[in-house]
Amino acid sequence: MRTNDCFDENGWLKDEYLWPLRQQITLGSIYVSDYENSFGIQSKKVCDFFTSFWDSYCQELAKEDGLWEQAVVLAKERLINEPDASESKVSNYQQDAYLELQCKKYDNEDTLLQWYGCFDGECPLPPTYVNVDIHWDFARSIRVIAASEDEAYDIVDEMMRKEEIPRSTFEPTGDYELDTNWQPESIL
């Protein structure tokens, strides 16, 4: 499957690929490199999206559902045989229980789709666009969604072979050549 198959005509990641994207990253990581993905979406954008999902959206849901209170009870149950446990140990157990409950309850496809559905206007997970120049007596440029320049080259080459790009825009007197040397600054 090609990267552009994962996006709709407006450049939004299709819903069915949101959870596979989530499974490729380390949720809650502070390292942008942990958000690299096979969908060609910039790691920084993926990091921002999932940080907002986890630190804002899921935290609000946790408050509404009283998750902290549940975590305190769970920590007490786990420490029942240690009545003299230090304050820091109790606090650590509470934090661990809270994170465990939060993961079980909110780190799932349905919650993620609810969050994604809150966005309107600009896509929070924009695809990478690659410019491919087609040289066939004179140059023409086309922009495609692709994870890499190689994938973009393959997409446009296939479009040319299948005659999906109108030949009326060219002088068809020979073979065409493709290159990805020039890229607009806005996509870098």
Image: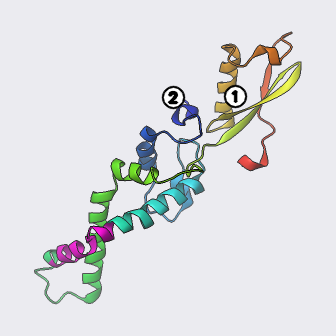
Q: Is residue 72 magenta?
A: yes
Foreground pick, 75 / 165: 165
Give the distance between the C-alpha atoms of the residues marked 1 and 2, in whole angstroms.
15 Å
Q: Residue at x 64, y 43 (%)?
A: 128
**Which segment is the magenta one?**
62-76
Indicate the secondary structure of the residue bearing disc 2.
loop
Q: Is residue 33 magenta?
A: no
Position of residue 71 relative to residue 100, above or below, is below
Indicate left or right for 101 with 131 as reference. left
Residue 92: image quadrant is: bottom left
Q: Which residue is mark 1?
A: 153
Residue 56: image quadrant is: bottom left
Residue 11, x across and y down, in percent: 59, 40
Indicate left or right for 44 with 76 as reference. right
Q: Which mark is residue 1?
A: 2
Indicate the secondary structure of the residue bearing disc 1.
helix
Foreground pick, 50 / 32: 50
